[in-house]
Image (cartoon, rainbow, N blue to C red):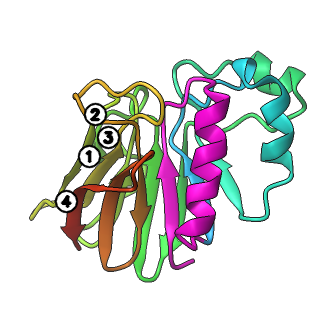
Amino acid sequence: MNRIFVFSDLHGNGDALKMLLSRASEEKCDHIICAGDLGLDRLGQYRDILRSLQIPFSMVRGNCDSVWTFSEAGFSIPPKYTVLNLGDRIVFVTHGDAIPSWNAAPIPLSEKDIFISGHTHIASVTKSSTGPTVMNPGSASSPRDNRPPSYAVVTNREILIKALGSRRILVELTI
């Protein structure tokens, strides 16, 4: 895995989902992650898009993601967190409600690792000298920080948070 596409807090916005998947392809990402609050119950016909993705897709369950909704729709129930490898880095992904910070993660994370969460609807990236880089991609549908809806592209060298509509870089960090 070389380029990870990350979004969060979609809350069932089907038009934003279509745009996100288009951006993931344009960005040449080889994995897509939803950091919770997908809003499957409001995606209706867009559910089939998720079933037919050509790029591997994984997600974690957010505070607005009902276990029942996933079960009824025939989807696997997403975990509260997932762990991926990006080169020699661990990428820990959670929504941020059950595991609010990197030091609450059930596995040890080092300075070279990346902790990703959503939940706040505020895009940010912070590099720490005592722990992992912490990233929130913001919200793909309803940001709370006077920025446009956003997504992130994570590589082994950098994290870019971009505006969903314009692709303008909002936050950039070399890691």
The amino acid at mark 1 is Asn
Instruction: Give the mark toward the camera: 3 or 2.
Output: 2
Crowding at label 4, few (<14), some or many (≥20) Cα neighbours within 10 Å? some
For residue 131, the mark is 4
The foreground one among 3 and 166 is 166
Tell me if residue 79 can be seen: no
Which quadrant holds residue 154? bottom left
Quarter of the image where the N terminus is located: bottom right
Whole-Å distance between the Cαs marked 1 and 3? Answer: 4 Å
Q: Which residue is mark 1?
A: 103
Cα–Cα span, label 3 and label 2: 20 Å
The residue lying at 68 percent from left, 18 percent from top is 66
Identify which residue is drawn at 41% across, 82% down: 88
Q: What's the distance in space between the residues labelled 4 and 1, CA to CA?
A: 8 Å
Q: Which residue is mark 3?
A: 104
Q: Are marks 3 and 4 in contact (CB under 8 Å)?
A: no
Q: SS of the residue at dot 3? A: helix
Q: CA distance from mark 4 to mark 2?
A: 20 Å
Mark 3 or 2 closer to N-term?
Answer: 3
Residue under the image location 57 percent in, 52 percent down: 33
Q: Which residue is mark 2?
A: 122
Label 3, label 4: how far apart the Cα atoms are: 12 Å
The answer to the question of whether label 1 and label 3 lie on touching residues, with beta carbons closer than 8 A, is yes
Q: Which residues are magenta?
A: 1-29
Whether the residues at callouts 4 and 1 have beta carbons within 8 Å, the answer is yes
Q: Residue at x 53, y 58 (%)?
A: 83
Residue 51 forms part of the magenta stretch: no
